[in-house]
Amino acid sequence: MEVNPLIPIRTSSRRLPRNKMNASLTSLEISVIGLGLVLMLADLFVPAERRRFIGYAAIAALGFLLAVSLSNNGSCSLAGTAFNGAFINDGLSLFFKRFFIIAAMLVLFIAAEFSDRIVAAAEYYSLILFALAGMLFAASANDFAMLFVSVELITITFYVLVSFQRGKLTSLEAGVKYLILGALSSAFLIFGIALIWGTTGKLNFTELAAVAPQFADSKIFLLGVLLVFVGLGFKIAAFPFQIWAPDVYQGAPTPTTAFLAVGSKAAGFVLLLRVLFTAVPSVVHTPIWANLLIVISGITILYGNLCALPQHNIKRLLGYSSISHAGYLLLGVAALNATGQAAVMYYLAGYLFTVLASFLVIALVLRHLDTEDISGLAGLSQRSPLLAATMTISMVSLAGIPPLAGFFGKFLLLKSVVEAAQTTGNPGYYCLIFTALAGVVISMYYYFGVIRAIYWSREAKDLSAIELSAPAMLTAWICIGGMFWIGLFPNTVLMLANAAATALNV
Amino acid sequence: MLAALALIVVPRNYRVPIRAIAVLATLISAGLAVKMFCQFVPRAAGFQFEQQIPWVESLGISYHVGVDGLNVGLILMGAIVAFAAALCSFEIQSREKEFYILLLVMTGGILGAFASLDLFFFYFLHEFALIPTFIMIGIWGRGEKKNYATFQITMYLSVGALIALIGLIALYVYSGAKTFDIPKIIEHVKASPLSAGDQNFIFPLLLFGFGILVSLWPFHSWAPLGYGVAPSPTAMLHAGVLKKFGLYGLIRIALPMLPQAAQSWANVIAWLCVGNILYVGWVAMRQKNLNLLIGNSSVAHMGFIFLGIASLNVIGISGAVFIMIAHGFLAALTFALSGYIYQQTGTLQINELGGLCRKLPFIGTALLMAAMAGCGLPGFANFAGEVSVFFGAWTTFPAITVIALWGALVIGGIYMTRAIRNVLHGPLPEKWNSLTDATHVWRKLPYALLLASLLLFGFWPRLLTEKINPDAEKILAQPTTETASHGGESAHSHQNLLTSAATK
């Protein structure tokens, strides 16, 4: 079989010894943190009117890191573990690391467009990079301590990022809400970890998986697993832990919202997949857990879609829509099979370009308006055809219509649930399928409402053309290209997702 | 020829905003479809003009198109109707570029869906054609009920398509063939049929999913309303061609892959189609708006096709395919004509119209002939199809056939002749004195073309039946139950009857 450069090498000759520091594996994370520090220093020397270029420099540096992670040469793409097994590099972590770096690059583009509205732009960029470092660590976490540290690194930077527009009341309100609920979720998480450690004495996922079957009847251990699930449920905004999402999405600066919607959610999912399927597989592969996941997934889909229906604020609408997408993604988790896990990753890859495209348009169009109402998009088709097309394609992809990324992702998720239904015969899966269908149909209504506002609303007052900088146009084209590429040529991403899913089922 | 088929499937020239390009593109595809139809060899094994490009190997999805007796006529019909629809689009006055782009996307999607031999692309290309329909009705639709109708048609058809999608995925998963390729799944299922329970789970998904798409009673209420407000090219393409997709899906996928379930659900289909024929026919009699009347009558015609499918024998099925083609021409013709009348008069209320034949002799005559074809008058293609459906259905459901015949002849006759009388004859209101007939040859061409096709297949049904019959036999060649073989035998005995009846 030919060696594919995109999948980490697993040959024994290059596998690094276990139970060693192997700090070189973390080169990607260390570089990102270093980059963040450099940006903060650079802020001191770069004149204020050229701040945008700090952002572009950061994007270029991340592009270099992405190229390194895609090539086979860097130590970051070696398979192996570091820090006594707390840090793991495998197909799954590499898939998500590339994902996070691409997301951060696109978010930095949006942030550069946004930089004239925030003071201390360079700090904003470096905070994004610190959050990115947290996500990279999360992708590699193989230990509850590492999991908690990475989650905290992400969450604490997001507290600052959410409330970055200090002058805006809504931004501060969002920051406080995120702080309180984030702290609550951390409390759940740490409590769950404590219970698991207290009963089993293990923190490492691999070691835990070996002993977990012995504790199958231990209520305290099961409660611990459940609490960890709750803590991660906050991160992905699944029902009933979704209350914060709409408020925070609405109040936060748009680039933060974009990163929250893509990066934070994906980090939640990689941790969820890793914990459920490598640390406690014996617990998860039971009918009770299947039913629990089915119920949560179904309610999340319905809640997100139904609540999105009456929204007028576009960012709030996307907040609810992101809840519903968490529900769709949970379909793949609830299926409890490898195709479901691969489908989750595939869907996230499509979701990345789709959501970032819509937030890019929101950041560009609404930055000069006081309102974030959907009516602010009126007449966009005349003001900027490119942005109108970007927003339309993104909404169509979110609604899951061919030939865009969202369709094939939903197709894979539904397929995995049908497979689960066939192999287990659990009637809950059938109900889940039809719940998901209902959700898709409901969602078409509000996504098409946005498209209608762009093309057919009559009350457009301001028809002046929107000036687009070259990087903004580039970002829009990247997102459009990404949505079409993932929708029309699924082979590459699907192969990577399948390879990543095998890491979960060794 | 393979390249030609690819060209039919994807008309790439979206960007050029001129009408001539759209007409030319559809003309080319229509020409190619005619050429393909003529070159098609009946009774050849397997598929012709096949083309296969792997797409996602790990899931067994490939872009696989090919033609056999079942879809060759449908593709021909679709291409001709698309050409006529492009010609009829002169009524679109605003945002023409977008309209033609959508029209071409829709055409490409439709023809691709019919040619597709891969479950995934089958669905994918159908969605591809469906979305432009919604947008076209939403923007270029007419009347004050536009938004409501758009909303309703979008909801109904999305739900239908999604249910069918689940059915298709379930078929893929349960068959265990690890491929989306339709011929391969059929082979696999023949070797190891699905259990009766699985079949009875998947078949209703497909039946009701596709049924909603085809406006099977009682899921039909979107259709008259949607066609009532749709711009006529859209109504022509959707009612004429795209709607047949669901029926085609049932014949192509559900019958050969789920033969047992088809047996047990045939009764249900048959009774539902009585709802289509009688109930909707009854509703059509009460309509005051010409477009709603045509829409309802088109829903009623779907009943005959369902009846043909439910009969589960060769004559019934080939009759069903035959009506699908004939009705495609007919629906396109009637919607094109009503679109012309609407454009001239600004209304389609039947009681406001009258005596139009004097002012619009060409359009009036065409409408008269279309109405006659709609009642199933011999000489038009609908007659040949309906006759064979009734022959086919007689062996399985005599009672229902009698009811359906009654519905077809009496109810259809009543509402069609009433409409003709009120619209074309009688006193001409003064305000219509300024109407002008279609004079230019390009304006006459679409109507003439569709009428000619109706008459051609009406007088010479063998052109189609000799192509459809062998493949209809293949679809039913599943000696799983006794009834199936029984139906097949009786079908053969009726074969001679049919050909003699049709050639008379």
Image: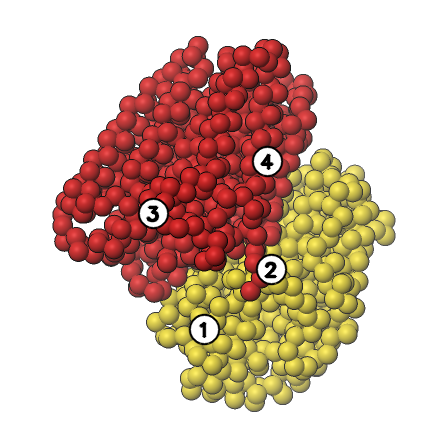
Chain colours: A red, B yellow
User: Which residue is under mark 4?
Assistant: A64
Identity of the amino acid at label 1?
Leu
**Which residue corresponds to the image point at 38% horizontal and 53% vertical from the top-left?**
A504
Identity of the amino acid at label 4?
Phe
Instruction: Point out the tag, 4 or 3, that comes first from the N-terminus.
Output: 3
User: Would you say A231 lies left or right of A60 here?
Assistant: left
Q: Chain of mark 2?
A: B
User: Which residue is under mark 1?
Assistant: B258
Identity of the amino acid at label 2?
Trp
Identity of the amino acid at label 3?
Asn
In front: A332, or A270?
Answer: A270
Is A299 drawn above or below residue B129 in the view shown?
above
User: Which residue is under mark 2?
Assistant: B55
User: Would you say B216 lies left or right of B78 here?
Assistant: left
Q: Chain of mark 1?
A: B
CB within 8 Å, label 4 to label 3: no
